[in-house]
Image (cartoon, rainbow, N blue to C red):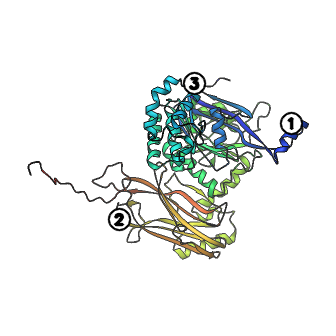
Amino acid sequence: MSVSSEIAIHVENLSKEFKLYSRPLDMFIEMVRGKPRHRPFWALQNISFDVYRGQVVGILGRNGAGKSTLLKIITGTLDKSSGAVQTHGRISSILELGTGFSGEYTGRENIYLGGLMVGLSREEIQAKEDWIIEFSELRDFVDQPFKTYSTGMQARLTFATAVCIDPDILIVDEALSVGDARFARKSFSQMEKFRKEGRTILFVSHDTNQVVAFCDHAIILEHGRVYDQGAPSYIRGVYYDLLFGKGKNSVAGTGGEIKTEYSLDVSKVKNEIGFCWQIGLAEIPVLGDSSEYPESSFFVLCEDGRPLGTGHSLHDNIRNFGKGLFSHWGSLLLFSTSDNSDPRTNGRKYSMRQKDSIEDTASMEKQLEPQEEDRPDESPERRDIRHHALKKLGLTQPFVDSGNTHVARYGNGKAELLDFGILDEQGNKVRKLVSGSKYTLFSRAVVYEKTHALVTGFTINNIYGIELVGINSFLQEKVIYDVPQGSVVETKVPVTMWITNGTYFLSVAIGDPEADTSVQFDQRFDALQFEVDFTKGIHTTSMVNLNADYSVEVVFKESE
């Protein structure tokens, strides 16, 4: 199989099965009798994705999702059960601490052992030995046995040895999380240097801020499958919903259920001709139309969650007229956007969604809109509760930041945020803030179902999706209990706005601190866009104003 030279890592339908035995003797009995005595566990199932040269890809996933298994197969330290993996270029990896190192050997001996394992000659290792020792900051301990090192010291030597070989592809598991902050910063600086040099990095982390700040593309693994992938800022919200929300599109269990929605990576979209765009769908298990089955596709193309044209559109019509027409034929999608704009630059999200889930989608979207008359499927009891709450609050409809295209919403609907925002000292809603001034973050929500415990929270993120501050009533020990149906919950958080210089987004949430799953009742990511004026006297790139009182003077003169 031929793979483009622009692809550094190609993974196609990769699966890994582990055999689990109830007792060691069962393995022997299985070998002798030839009858299975094990139960299969699929750590990976039909994983497919590409990593392009110079790309930094982050992998997120809960414990047991298959992240480490995937990296081991890519690096060649673990065999696959089926599928294909191709890599182009020299690979260096940092997996579990001390992988490939001997505890009995000294640090210096392990430098040579690690270098030989990745293909360096003894002479090449010797030339890099001093650099490795200096970078790891272990000169005083390099001749001590590796098993006597702390986990942080092991991480230093592992990382320094891995990066010294100037790899084309660097694969990093979560080993760096055990190091001290100063060395972690040093390590990320080295990885940033690799990135600027156009090298490929595959990076695993639980920290969404790291992924958003450092990566070009992100992938979520769940139960050994690709749960979703796309731009890191988008994947941050999806991952948070998987952890704390419903996660309704999850591939539950290991039975291989097809998701109801698959996001499309617009960076892979190409212009066919006219208004027609194309993207291959071979990486996702979505069946398109064919000559034998001309109406077999049960997926619909959606733009920002809204379905575009229905059915199979003629190619010439998409080219010449567009306006949301699409054709899903085999593994190729030909489509146009709703306004014939460029899908790579218009800022919208595109996905393939099952037809039988569109009705639920439409109902959900209507509930997000403020117009009361647009909720025909809502129960009379729920509508009455909301109307009464709005009247008590002096509102005619729930607040929505209508001009904000970044907002994403999750939750199980047991409560609804009716109003939120930022108030100045006079109690007025504001979007233009002055750094150093006092404001109040607030939210008002109505409770549709009696709940034993309830918390609220806020986060502020910058335009890159990096969280600058997060606060909630659980951390502040302000949980409220036994909240009856129909209650209106108001939260006010007085703050001094020491953020400065730029555009930011306020996220708001209300949820259940005692729930294991479906934690959020209603959560709005990037729900309110606001601006903070530039502060004089500090760098224009600064995001924090420390209210510095600058003083500089000559305290000693040579003539005195």
Query: Which element type, helix, strand or loop, lies under badge 2?
Result: loop
Q: Nearer the viewer, residue 102 or 485?
A: 102
221 relative position to 169: left or right: right
Q: State the CA–CA distance, disc 3 to disc 1.
A: 43 Å
Q: Is residue 437 above or below residue 353?
A: below
Residue under the image location 58 percent in, 57 percent down: 409
Which label was assigned to residue 31? Answer: 1
* Among numbered discs 2 and 3, the one appearing first in the sequence: 3
Q: Position of residue 547 (x, y in %)?
A: 31, 60
| Residue 123 point in image, percent of width and height | 49, 23
Amino acid type at circle 1 is Met
Residue located beneath label 3 in the image: 5
Q: Secondary structure at mark 3?
A: loop
- Amino acid type at circle 2 is Ser
Callout 1 touching callout 2 (CB < 8 Å):
no
In the visual, does 354 lie left or right of 550? right
User: Who comes first in sequence, dot 3 or dot 1?
Assistant: 3
Q: Which mark is residue 437?
A: 2
- At a point 49% along the width and 43% down the height, the residue shown is 214
| Label 1 or label 2, whichever comes before in sequence order | 1
In the foreground, 325 or 181: 181
Are the two marked residues, 3 and 1, in contact with CB atoms closer than 8 angstroms? no
Q: Position of residue 74 (x, y in %)?
A: 64, 34
The image position of residue 477, as x and y in percent, is: 53, 71
Tell me the number on the disc at residue 20.
none
Is residue 501 depicted above or below 290 in this figure? below
Please give the name of the residue rendered at 69% of the width and 43% of the height, measured from the top-left corner: 225
Q: CA distance from mark 1 to mark 2?
A: 74 Å
Question: Nearest the camera: 463 or 169?
Answer: 169
- The residue sitting at the right extreme is 33
Query: Which of 41/251 is in front?
Result: 41
Instruction: Specify the quadrant that holds the N terminus.
Output: top right
